[in-house]
Amino acid sequence: MSSPVRAFREKYLDMGKMKEVLSVTTPLDIIKKKRAEAINRILSRGYLSTKRVYVGMATCEVAAGSKDVMEVFENAIKKEGLTDVYLSQKGCAGRCNLEPTVEVVEEGKIPIKYGKVTPDMARQIIDRHLKKGEVVKEWIIH
């Protein structure tokens, strides 16, 4: 048995993955399976969504309340069925006086940045901007 094959089998046998080694016979089959799993993760996490929401989560933004804002968006996606939205964190934007910040990026449109976002404002951004397409002009950062 060649060294790469032995190393491959030892890796999977040592990790308690004997079923995977026995059910998938070639390294190419394992690569195909891993690729399919990666594609499913990409799709399930919303990476290909037409709307993206970035909540500022730098240290100073967390101190200003961004964790509560992020939680509102997370709940809307997980519990309230908000779809076609990719939610992520962003780092420091250098606008400490306007924190917490939320950026909404929609396919084919100019990104919109909201400042001093509270959990209640986040709910309104979800209802008005993400669901109805209405930009909340009074909260925009220019």
Image (spheres, rainbow, N blue to C red):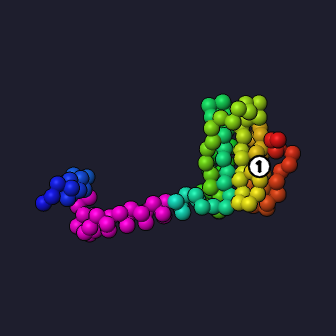
The residue shown at (77%, 34%) is 98
Relative to the observer, which residue lies in front, 103 or 70? Answer: 103
Task: Residue 24: say if magenta.
Answer: yes
Residue farthest toward the right in the current orientation of the protein:
138
Q: Is residue 138 magenta?
A: no
Q: Quadrant of the C terminus?
A: top right
- Disc 1 residue type (three-letter): Ile
Tell me where residue 107 appears, x and y as whole percent: 71, 60
Q: Taking 58 as reference, is 36 left or right? A: left
Measured as percent of width and height from the top left, residue 81 is found at 64, 62
* Residue at horizontal 12 percent and vertical 60 percent from the top: 1
Q: SS for tag 1? A: strand
**Residue 40 appearing in the image:** yes
Q: 48 left or right of 24?
A: right
Q: Is residue 75 visible?
A: no
Rendered view: 65 above or below 134: above
Give the class, few, some or many, for how many residues have Cα within 10 Å of label 1's Cα (few <14, many ≥20): some
Q: Which residues are magenta?
A: 16-41
Q: In the picture, residue 114 is in which quadrant? A: top right
Instruction: Kindly give the residue lying farthest to the left in the view shown.
Output: 1
Which residue lies at the image location 72% right of the left edge and 51% below the top edge? 104
At x 65%, y 35%, the residue is 92
Residue that numbered label 1 is attached to:
112
Q: Nearer the viewer, residue 85 or 94?
A: 94
Magenta-colored segment: predominant secondary structure: helix
Circle count: 1
Residue 125 as seen in the image, left or right of residue 46: right
Side (left or right) of 132 relative to 51 = right
Front residue of 105/117: it is 105
Horizontal and vertical percent for residue 63?
A: 66, 30
Residue 59 against residue 107 in the figure, above or below: above
